[in-house]
Amino acid sequence: MTRVGAVDCGTNSIRLLVADRAVDGLRDLHREMVVVRLGQGVDATGRFADEAIERTRAALAGYAATMRDLGVQRVDMVATSATRDAANRDEFFAMTAELLGTVVPGAVARVISGDEEARLSFRGAVGDLDPALGPFAVTDLGGGSTELVVGDASGVRAAYSANVGCVRTTERCLPGDPPGEDEIAAAQAFIDERLAPAFAAVDVSDVRTWVGVAGTMTTLAALALDLPEYDPQRIHLARVPLGQLEQICWSLVDMPRARRAELGVMHPGRVDVIGAGALVTDALAKQMSRRAGIDELVVSEHDILDGIALNLLD
């Protein structure tokens, strides 16, 4: 049996999944997430910060050790929005090749397009859903980009990657703690501008189920469920009515960071950017309601990582 290691390196976090093939998809052996903020300052400078690369190196070194210990035979590491934007990404790829090569000789990381990111996210997100609930719209809200993809049991119909995410929007528009009205208005305008071409390119009019993936969405679901601490099993496939989702989003936007940090479900690395993520989510919800009549969000713990792993096992 082939054992695979999937690594997703985004703008805010780097994540690992080690898995085997199961009858109904994947058998998880290990999942892990570390917030490294690789995209620190990339939106403004166009370059990775030295300290951001070093944080990522430390996390990936730990992942490489885990994959060696678990006997991973095939590995794929994908890098997304921040890496697409960084002028000094060769330095990053030299580091990742050195570490991944200790797991599988010759293994290297690769930067993927927004379109491939969307398709991998879709494959991972809808695997546990009844095909009869489709067509599906999947939104993967990351640190630097947000993917919108529509498809059904036969596959992806259309996809678009918008250059808007929780880290990018925070750095560009939301320095305040909590942000002021002018900052919030600027963030909303920025988000709407970046999402407009996504909804122009991807027709969601016949979508029956909206699925949200990644850390902002899963944290919002945890708050909707009133969990005392983060619980992936309870969060996976949770359904959040849009009215409740809007209330949670705006409470986070208005909340000082110190108060966010006190929430039992809040990862420390998400405290400063969850307000921007909430604004992006609120904008997505309004579009899905207006264009498709959607009245709830289904949140999946399975996403691009699962898509990467499934591709390795094909």
Image (tube, grey):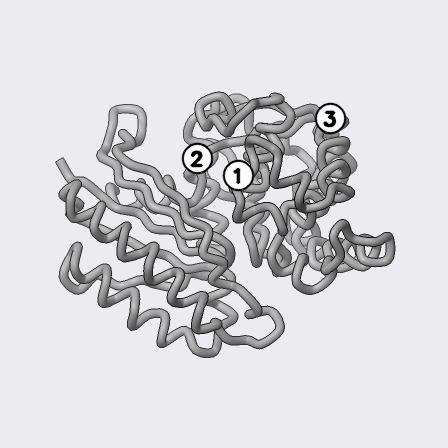
Residue at 67% in and 58% down:
169
Label of residue 131 in the image? none
Q: Earlier in the sequence, mark 1 or mark 3?
A: 1
Q: SS of the residue at dot 3?
A: helix
Q: Residue furthest right?
A: 181
Read off the residue under disc 3.
244
Q: Earlier in the sequence, mark 3 or mark 2?
A: 3
Q: SS of the residue at dot 2?
A: loop
Q: Which residue type does callout 3 highlight?
A: Gln
Q: Relative to residue 247, is residue 84 depicted above or below?
A: below
Read off the residue under disc 2.
302
**As rendered, which of 263 and 70 lies closer to the eye?**
263
Q: Which residue type does callout 1 highlight?
A: Val
Quarter occupied by residue 238:
top right
Q: CA distance from mark 1 to mark 2?
A: 7 Å
Read off the residue under disc 1.
213
Q: Is residue 84 left or right of residue 189?
A: left
Q: CA distance from mark 1 to mark 3?
A: 18 Å
